[in-house]
Image (spheres, grey):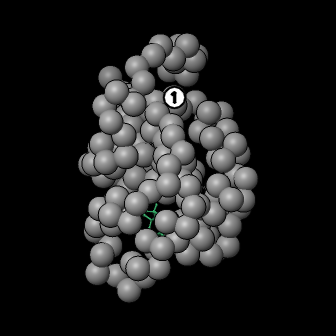
Amino acid sequence: MPNTSERTFIAIKPDGVQRNLVGKIIQRFEERGYKLVALKLVQASKNHLEVHYQDLKEKPFFPGLIKYMQSGPIVAMVWEGLDAVRQGRAMLGATNPLDSNAGTIRGDYCIQTGRNICHGSDSVDSANREISHWFKQDELVDYEFANKVWLY
Ligand code: RTP
């Protein structure tokens, strides 16, 4: 039985928000067939971002990354559906937008690694950690997804 309830954490970074790409990015996940489970616009604190990117804290780009992620509001989302984590990453494209295929979000809308407009969990374990870091349990909305019968 395929797991149609896999969840991933997707964020639209400050540059994506400022460049008015929120609607386009959401639309891609909607059109692909993923179910929106949670969504909010947040100005994240330094501490919150340092915990989110804790695995990168030794990297030379870490301070710049935190500053970039704090430079404006972020759209935090949870999307659910078959293979959501892997497909979410595929839809985002490569970390370096210059290596991203056309047709991916980064391949279509950005140019530089340090301004790559979106984030997606890289594993189911990271997704679970990130979802509980960004959302309280009661912000994950439980509702019937009518499309499901046509998708699976
Ligand atoms: P993300 O977590 O944002 O989805 O990105 P990712 O997994 O594709 O890449 P990761 O290696 O986890 O890096 C996180 C974010 O740090 C910025 N970065 N800058 N200047 C650099 O060399 C550099 N490398 C990474 C990017 O914003 C990247 O998305």
Q: Position of residue 22 (x, y in %)?
A: 66, 47
The answer to whether residue 35 is left or right of residue 102 is left
What residue sits right under mark 1 in the picture? 35
Q: Is residue 26 visible?
A: yes
Q: With respect to residue 61, does 152 lie above or below?
A: above
The answer to whether residue 60 is left or right of residue 144 is left
Residue 50 found in image quarter: bottom left
Q: Is residue 118 visible?
A: no
- Does mark 1's beta carbon lie closer than 8 Å to ligand 1? no
Q: With respect to residue 52, does 96 lie above or below?
A: below
Residue at 30% in and 42% down = 132
Q: SS of the residue at dot 1?
A: strand
Q: Position of residue 87 (x, y in %)?
A: 49, 46
Q: Nearer the viewer, residue 120 or 71?
A: 71
Q: Amino acid at mark 1?
A: Lys
Residue at 39% in and 30% down = 139
| Disc 1 residue crowd, few under 14, some 14–19, many 20+, Cα 10 Å | many
Number of marks:
1
Residue at 47% in and 79% down = 64
Q: Position of residue 119 (x, y in %)?
A: 49, 57
Q: With respect to residue 128, does 82 lie above or below?
A: above
The answer to whether residue 90 is left or right of residue 130 is right
Q: Nearer the viewer, residue 90 or 8?
A: 8
- Quarter holding the N terminus is top left
Q: Nearer the viewer, residue 67 or 54?
A: 67
Residue at 51% in and 28% down = 35
Q: Position of residue 151 (x, y in %)?
A: 55, 22
